[in-house]
Image (cartoon, rainbow, N blue to C red):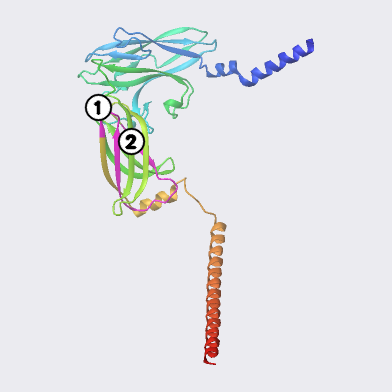
């Protein structure tokens, strides 16, 4: 009886391990060795938020505090730097250090008004340190908000990785002079339309811009590309619930697929709506024969037919043609014989009638 009890225990333990494998190990692996938390500021607009949402005054200097706490004995080296909000290709608000991704309408971004006093910090043996970040508001008054994030990155992470893929914690940072609603942008522009290769794919790219210092929220997009002369629709794409960062732009992607692009003049039509505002755009763009040829050749996403399949196809077509020719000739011969027999029967009937 005891042996059976032991067996039941072992079986249950095995089942639990199977259903919930490496729970402790997974938690250890996910632990970067440190945690960060924002210290509430006296200028915090919304004290309920865990990120910084700071009220500013032109030219004012503020000190923001962040607690960095070690969660293990071994030392952990952390790099700290500010980033700016921009709109990613999939209509999401992301963060970047690359100034090339920022729109020209963005003045005094977060990275230009934030100074980290200690850009590199080491914590160890469960210690806690307080980090000071200096926020210097622009001298000129601004409307809306400026959005970015403070990144606390594990030292040793590859520098060329996107911020979203790095081993890091982020604390959001939003600044505003009045604390008004900042998710109600009402302006959207279509800056450009073109066809090019992106990530090895043939695409039509429409550059959309939100020039306001507010978030453009929950936009739905319907887009189609037509040949200008024939009005033939060659591509349709829809997207839902896109969001655009303040003063940002992004390239809305229309994947051409594996079919070959041909040169010509095309029309891009877009309808964009978020339930409060509607926008309609039309933009003409041209693909030269040389561009189309180059994209079709360089694309990593295309249908490549092996030579043997082409050869077999040609042989089958020839055989099919020969069979059709033989069948038609045979049918013609049979019709001729049938008509000949019919004529002979008519002659016989006439002879009988004469008799």
List the residue tagged with mark 1. Answer: 212
Q: SS at mark 2?
A: strand
Indicate the quadrant where residue 280 lies.
top left
Q: Is residue 260 magenta?
A: yes
Q: Residues within 10 Å of mark 1 (few under 14, many from 20)?
A: many
List the residue tagged with mark 2. Answer: 221
Placement of the C terminus among the 4 image quadrants: bottom right
Q: Position of residue 210 (x, y in %)?
A: 27, 30
The residue lying toward the viewer, choosing from 174 and 134, is: 174
The residue lying toward the viewer, choosing from 149 and 98, is: 149
Residue 265, above or below 95: below
- Lateral position of residue 199 relative to residue 27, left or right: left
Residue 257, above or below 181: below
Indicate the quadrant where residue 251 lies.
top left
Residue sitting at x 29%, y 54%:
229
Q: Earlier in the sequence, mark 2 or mark 1?
A: 1
Q: Nearer the viewer, mark 2 or mark 1?
A: 2
Q: Residues within 10 Å of mark 2 (few under 14, many from 20)?
A: some
The residue lying toward the viewer, choosing from 276 and 63, is: 276
Q: Position of residue 73 (x, y in %)?
A: 54, 10
Residue most extreme to the left: 140
Task: Give the distance between the C-alpha atoms of the residues marked 2 and 1, in whole angstroms.
Answer: 19 Å
- Lateral position of residue 186 relative to residue 82, left or right: left
Residue sitting at x 52%, y 54%:
305
Q: Position of residue 116 (x, y in %)?
A: 36, 16
Residue most extreme to the bottom: 355
Magenta-highlighted residues: 249-278
């Amino acid at each position: 009886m005891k042996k059976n009890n032991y067996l039941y225990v072992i079986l249950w333990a095995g089942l639990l391990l199977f259903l919930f494998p490496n729970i402790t190990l997974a938690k250890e692996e996910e632990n970067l060795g440190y945690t960060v938390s924002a210290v509430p500021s006296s200028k915090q607009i919304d004290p309920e938020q865990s990120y910084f949402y700071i009220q500013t005054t032109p030219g004012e200097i503020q000190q923001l505090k962040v607690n960095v706490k070690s969660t293990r004995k071994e030392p952990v080296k952390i790099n700290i730097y500010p980033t700016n909000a921009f709109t990613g290709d999939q209509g999401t608000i992301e963060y970047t250090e690359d100034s090339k991704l920022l729109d020209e309408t963005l003045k005094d971004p977060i990275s230009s008004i934030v100074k980290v006093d200690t850009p590199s910090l080491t914590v160890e043996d469960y210690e806690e340190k307080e980090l000071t970040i200096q926020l210097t508001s622009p001298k000129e008054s601004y409307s809306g908000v400026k959005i970015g994030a403070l990144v606390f990155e594990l030292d040793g992470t590859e520098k060329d990785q996107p911020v979203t893929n790095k081993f890091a914690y982020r604390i959001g940072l939003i600044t505003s002079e009045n604390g008004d609603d900042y998710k109600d942008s009402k302006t959207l522009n279509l800056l450009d339309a073109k066809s090019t290769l992106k990530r090895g794919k043939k695409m039509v790219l429409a550059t959309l811009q939100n020039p306001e210092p507010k978030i453009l929220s929950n936009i739905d997009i319907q887009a189609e590309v037509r040949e200008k002369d024939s009005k033939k629709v060659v591509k349709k794409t829809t997207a839902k619930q896109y969001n655009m960062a303040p003063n940002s732009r992004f390239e809305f992607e229309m994947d051409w697929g594996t079919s070959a692009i041909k040169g010509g003049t095309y029309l891009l039509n877009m309808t964009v709506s978020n339930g409060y505002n509607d926008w309609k755009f039309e933009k003409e763009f041209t693909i030269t024969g040389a561009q189309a040829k180059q994209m079709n050749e360089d694309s990593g996403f295309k249908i490549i037919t092996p030579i043997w399949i082409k050869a077999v196809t040609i042989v089958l077509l020839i055989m099919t043609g020969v069979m059709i020719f033989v069948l038609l000739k045979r049918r013609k011969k049979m019709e001729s014989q049938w008509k000949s027999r019919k004529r002979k029967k008519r002659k016989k009937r006439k002879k009988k009638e004469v008799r």
